[in-house]
Image (cartoon, rainbow, N blue to C red):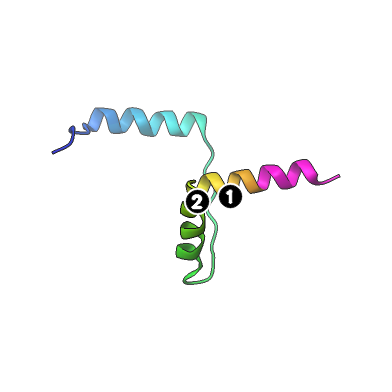
């Protein structure tokens, strides 16, 4: 099987995420999440990456 992910590694990862990233939660209508994930996967991106890129592009194009 794969490498073991220790409790210490998990704590370090959680600490890193807390210091370096903000978390945004959104709600979407039932069934839409999978549609959005499939669309992102077709573009070879994660859903989070796709959403972030779309927001950034929209912000650049807004006067």
Residue at left offset 52%, top offset 53%:
25
**Residue 4 rendering spot, x and y as whole percentages:** 18, 33
In depth, the one of 23 and 31 nearer the eye is 31
Q: Which mark is residue 22?
A: none
Give yes or no for contact between labels 2 and 1 (Cβ–Cβ under 8 Å).
Answer: yes
Image position of 52 with respect to 11: above or below: below
Q: Is residue 23 magenta?
A: no
Range of magenta residues:
55-63
Indicate yes or no whether the magenta region holds residue 56.
Answer: yes
Residue 37 vs residue 21, the one in the foreground? 37
Find the residue positioned furthest to the bottom: 30
Residue 22 is left or right of residue 55, and the answer is left
Disc number placed over residue 47 in the picture, else none: 2
Q: Quadrant of residue 53?
A: top right
Q: Which numbered marker is on residue 51?
A: 1
Q: Using the numbered discs, state the Cα–Cα distance from disc 2 to disc 1 in whole angstroms.
A: 6 Å
Q: Specify few, some or many for label 1: CA neighbours under 10 Å numbering under 14, 14-19, or 20 or more.
A: some
Q: Residue at coordinates 51% horizontally, 67% vertically from top-left? A: 32
Quadrant in which the C terminus appears: top right
Mark 2 neighbour density, 10 Å: few (under 14) some (14–19) many (20 or more): some
């Amino acid at each position: 099987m794969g490498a073991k992910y220790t409790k210490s590694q998990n704590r370090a990862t959680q600490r890193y995420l807390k210091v370096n990233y903000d978390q945004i939660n959104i709600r979407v209508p039932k069934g839409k999440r999978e549609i959005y994930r499939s669309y992102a996967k077709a573009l070879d991106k994660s859903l989070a990456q796709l959403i972030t890129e779309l927001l950034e592009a929209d912000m650049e194009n807004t006067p």
